[in-house]
Amino acid sequence: MKLFTIFGDPVSHSISPLLHNRAIRELNLDACYTRTHLKDGSNLRKIFEDLGLDGANVTVPHKENAYRQCDEIRGVAKKIKAINTIIKEKDKLIGYNTDAPGFYESTREFKNVKNALILGAGGTAKAIATILKEKNIKTTILNRSKNRLAFFEKEGFSCFDWSNFEKDNNIYDIVINTTSAGLKDNALPVPKDLLNTILKDAKYATDVIYNKKTLFLKAAQNADIQTKDGSDMLLYQGVIAFNLFFDNKLSLYDISKAMRPAFEL
Ligand code: NDP
């Protein structure tokens, strides 16, 4: 039997065990997925080995720490320098980031996206900006403060904070909220006037926050923009991780079909 877990702090709220165990059952696989509350991220590798795991997901705040403890990093995670999935291959731990392709997969229904504006500059913004750049989508970053813009400037993105943002001639086909504004409160990710300017001419708006219609999404809907929340991103990062857990031999369609009903539980 294969054994998987999700490491996080907190981790009790995570629906990953529900998603993965449902897919394990539906696809008739011999495996089990648990959750592990990990306070000290520097112990992650030792606990992974002590538990005899075959793979794991990693959530806040351990994604960067986990990146440093793997033997090898593959794919976009090399750029992002944060991982959310670990696979044991022989005696080696291989790190992947499935948040980035998970986001991309979740927005494939949006057509003709050439320009994107990301609100926020944290870990999720890094993952999304990196995958959009890989897909040749011109991406601009707008954050509340300057502090976290250095990574994006180094990677060649146009970067602004609230004080110096000027909407250039570009129309942002998609505006993506990656801030935690709206997660536990009713805050907007940028001041209202600025938001109205940003949303003008946009075709799509997405929020990485899931299972909640944030004020940001409500504002976008009021501006007649097509919207979606972060549920599909969460689903697809799980689908892609699940396939990695099983040697990439399953069909993404079958996994997502098996996992999706877990959102309704
Ligand atoms: P980080 O802590 O790394 O970054 C938070 C960002 O939000 C920073 O840019 C910060 O700006 C900004 N911010 C926080 N509060 C406010 C506010 N009130 N107004 C404006 N900006 C604000 O967070 P993560 O990137 O790890 O996570 C962000 C969100 O993504 C969370 O809500 C998380 O739940 C969600 N998420 C969803 C996933 C999914 O699958 N759907 C996957 C992963 C994350 P500053 O630099 O100025 O502090």
Image (spheres, rainbow, N blue to C red):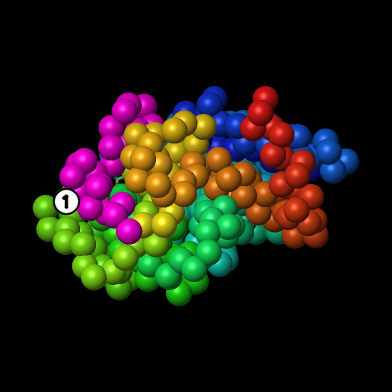
Picture quadrant of residue 19? top right
- The mark total stands at 1
- In percent of width and height, residue 178 lies at 38, 47
Image check: 20 left or right of 137? right
- Please say whether residue 54 is visible from this viewpoint: no
Magenta stretch bounds: 180-201
Residue drawn at 75 percent across, 53 percent down? 253
Location of mark 1 (residue):
162
- In the picture, which quadrant includes the C terminus? top right
Picture quadrant of residue 27? top right
The question of residue 169 being in magenta is answered with no
Q: Is residue 18 above or below residue 197?
A: above
Q: Is residue 130 above or below residue 56?
A: below
Residue drawn at 30 percent across, 73 percent down? 156
Q: Is residue 51 above or below residue 133?
A: above
Q: Quadrant of ligand 1?
A: top left
- In percent of width and height, residue 240 lies at 65, 54
Residue drawn at 32 percent across, 65 percent down? 171
- In percent of width and height, residue 116 lies at 38, 62
The question of residue 194 being in magenta is answered with yes
Residue drawn at 53 percent across, 26 percent down? 13
